[in-house]
Image (cartoon, helix red, strand yellow):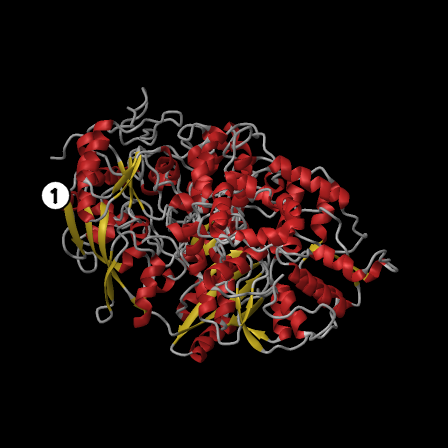
Amino acid sequence: MAEQHRPLTGQPAPRPGSPGPSGPSASSVPAASSVPSASPDFVAALRSAVRGTSDFGPTARALTTMDASNYRRVPLGVCAPRDADDVAAALAVCREHGVPVVPRGGGTSIAGQATGTGLVLDLTRHLRTILDVDPAARTAVVQPGVILDDLRAAAAPHGLTFGPDPSTHSRCTLGGMIGNNSCGAHSVAWGTTADNVTKLSVVRYGGEVLRLEQGGGNGPAGVRELIASHLALLRTGYPDLPRRISGYALDALLPEHPGGPDPVRAFCGSEGTLGVVTEATVRLVEAPRARALAVLGYADESAAADAAPGLLPYGPLTVEGMAADLVREPAGLPRGAAWLFVETGGATPAEARAHAERILRAADAVDGTVVTDPAGQRALWRVREDAAGTATRMPDGSEAWPGWEDCAVPPARLGAYLRDFRALLAEHGLRGTPYGHFGDGCIHVRVDFDLITEAGVARFRRFSEEATGLVVAHGGSLSGEHGDGQARAELLPRMYGDGLVALFGRFKDLWDPDGGLNPGMLVRPARLDEGLRFSVLPKRPVDVEFGYPQDGGDFAGAVRRCVGVAKCRTTETSGAGVMCPSFRATGEEAHSTRGRARLLHEMLAGEIVTDGWRSTEVRDALDLCLSCKGCRSDCPVGVDMATYKAEFLHHHYRGRLRPAAHYAMGRLPRWLRLARPFARPLNALARVRPLAALAKRLAGIAPERAIPVLATETYSRWLRARQGPGTRVLSTDRVVHLWADTFTEHLSPQVGRAAVRVLEEATGRTVLPPPRGACCGLTYVSTGQLDAARRVMRDTLDRLDLLPGLPLVVLEPSCAATLRTDLPELLPDDPRAAELASSVVTFAQYLEEYAPDWTPPRLDRPAAGQTHCHQHAVLGDAAERRLRERLGLTGDLSGGCCGLAGNFGFEKGHWEVSVACAEERLLPAVREAEPGAELLADGFSCRTQLDQLAGRRARHLAEVVAEALGDGDDAPRAGSRS
């Protein structure tokens, strides 16, 4: 007989007059305003029993209030167990104290099942070991915190892979995949996670360990009898679908199940409600040696959906669908308004291509192409994989949310379902962008629900109920991949009927009689329209400094851009991507873009983080943000943490004493102008160690850093002297405006001199002397001195006298990015700011537009170095790549961030993270460069980092071109310094 349910901390009793425990209205989630704290006795008991870390502070709680769903639940604290014994000990303590538990992996669940009101078990910190890979048996043994891409990398040398591959493969965990029964694009070939797990070690609430194996029993006592007494219901109650994820898979426990009752399959997809996985044996599949991608264009998504089932007999690896309203830049896609991505494999590239071409010929498509180049395939797949983020913004920039995220219907019914679904959206005045696994009949969609107003939430509920009826009418499942969680569990009786849903409850009670594991999910669920994460945000826009033009001027709107898909948590270091260097350096959620966005969300909510702009929790998390702007381009939803950081620092230190580094480096342009006449003696004094140490201490500079050398002749002084007094402009179309940024002006004038030589040689135009004292305001912005930044920017706009229609060439990428983005966002009401921002171009962009017929000298040697993070995020580097190709400089520059990042790497306390960021990509790329390779870095920070950490001098591209032009007036020499 099952034990009686015990009350759980933080769980209210059912509301008076509401249905009983199994009714859909019973909620285990407290109201948003109720934020209980952990009892001292529980905290002491947990820390005594568990060797891993536990944290009940506001930061840890704030970081785990949300996953990638619309829901928010405030936990009591977070525990990171070290091993399986720790998991069991934690669960025993939680049962003793009546504290509910939610296991958490990557936190990318879209239905709310990775949030909880009790103790969050963080299984990613320690339980992330691949215990065994057996190529002969084609199996691997993993702990639950193993990242999917790490498993795939371990299996790859043996020609194997793990078949299921959700789009979050770079950060999702195997434990989370088991909990959700994740699938991914290749499920048409290799099935779901449940199809690829053979053994599990799980811990029940209370600490009991169970070993589950295919054909090896049913789990806890009483399960066999429960199944035997309901055979007819279980045999008839489930739709026959390749992507049926909703509810518990109790039909896997039927005696006629192939191989006998399968408790492993029944456990997969249980969303942490039955037990906590501590170890899993998974099946590996043979990875094709070569792949090709057939991209097929169709008139619309319904036509693509109608065509998808006909391609399955050809044995593709994927049949993915996507409509035009999801694609912002359709480069590389064939004609059409919707596309199917059909991947094929083979032993050789020719075999994979032939397979794809057969599919292309068989498909009744408007247009199509076969892509065999791996880089081209990756670029196309990136469009599809980023859809979970990009779909959160409609083409007009308005918000869209999960909530009807991933239903599945029989593939043959998908076209008809999509037509009906589009009609239902129109009926409710809603918009959505369907995409997903057309070959399996599974559709993802983000809808522009209004989840803030009462009327909008009510419409969200009505739509969900009617969409449920539509899915059921087409013979489908409410979840085809992401699980039910809080988003759909309430609706399960519409799909399965009351009898089968009641059986789910009895099954849950056999596993978890106390109801302590992830309450509110799957059985006795919370309502789908309560606990929404938006309800705690301010109802009116808060007073902020930046314009936030993409978010209607609303800082809360900017913060809620983060939907939690956690692309910022990837440890991937290849390619040109930048985001998020501080997370890769520390591995801490608080130092990811998502973590910081969550803390800002909770700061605005004011329940856990209670000090508003004065919050030390937010300050500490933002302290290691490098302001690299990588998230601005790499985050699928365009979170711009550099801007949010500047905004926060402005408010946090308003009227208060700032860190010394803010006065020293934040106001660097002012100090450098004052220091210019004394450059020689100051350089000499900086070489006296005791004096340098004292200066660094007073300025808040890391003691490990060397003070940069000041130029004895500034760039603008050199240019005016070179041209002589009274330079006349004879024709306005024969001049070049070249910005004299602070770094070029005072620290690396050789870059400016080189640029002048090249621009005048290539265009025949005259470079005009810059206006005195102009500054972009970068250092003021990065330290959050926004009042000063605006004064500097307005002064610059007053001083500048750009000739109409001419661009402004900016050599320093960080200054160019500031002028392009921060300037118009801080001065949104000054039309001159937008005009100046639109005129900014890079050195290479200017040459490409104004000297298209110029033939640069050939260098014909390899190149190494780094693309500046701001260049990648804001300006793009396509013109630089093309110029390097014309110069004969071969090889790609590394991505990422150098780690110096302006003032960041100079500030005391940032040395270790700064070095770790440099060691990630930049320093290894330079060490591995071929002998004689040209070291390129257009950013002063990147060049300084290389100089100080590797003893290597990198150069701006302008310097390299100028040297290649040969001796000339003021031509720079390799290795020269000013």
The C terminus appears in which quarter of the rendering? bottom right
Q: Is residue 455 left or right of residue 50?
A: right
Tally the numbered discs: 1
Q: Position of residue 462 (x, y in %)?
A: 47, 34
* Residue 467 in sight here: no
Question: Residue 222 vs residue 505: left or right?
Answer: left
Closest to the observer: 434 or 410?
Answer: 434
State the residue at coordinates (78%, 51%).
802
Going by the image, does 197 lie left or right of 775? left
Q: Nearer the viewer, residue 843 or 19?
A: 843
Q: On the image, numbered disc 1 is attached to which residue?
A: 221
Crowd tier of the residue under label 1, counting other residues whose Cα lies within 10 Å: few below 14, some 14–19, many 20 or above: few
Quadrant of the image for the N terminus? Answer: top left
Which residue lies at the image location 72% right of the left edge and 63% below the top edge?
756
Identify which amino acid the numbered label 1 is placed on: Ala
- The percent coordinates of residue 655 (x first, y second) are 55, 28
252 with respect to 623 (left or right):
left
Q: Is residue 760 visible?
A: yes
Is 36 drawn above or below residue 854 in the view shown? above
Q: Quadrant of residue 876?
A: bottom right
Q: Give the residue at the far top of this rendering.
A: 16
| Image position, residue 329 (x, y; %) | 60, 58
Of residues 113 and 43, which is closer to you in this image?
A: 43
Determine which quarter of the picture holds residue 199.
bottom left
The percent coordinates of residue 179 (x first, y second) are 30, 48
Please tell me whether mark 1 sits on a helix, a strand or a loop. Answer: loop
- Identity of the residue drawn at 34% across and 41% down: 113
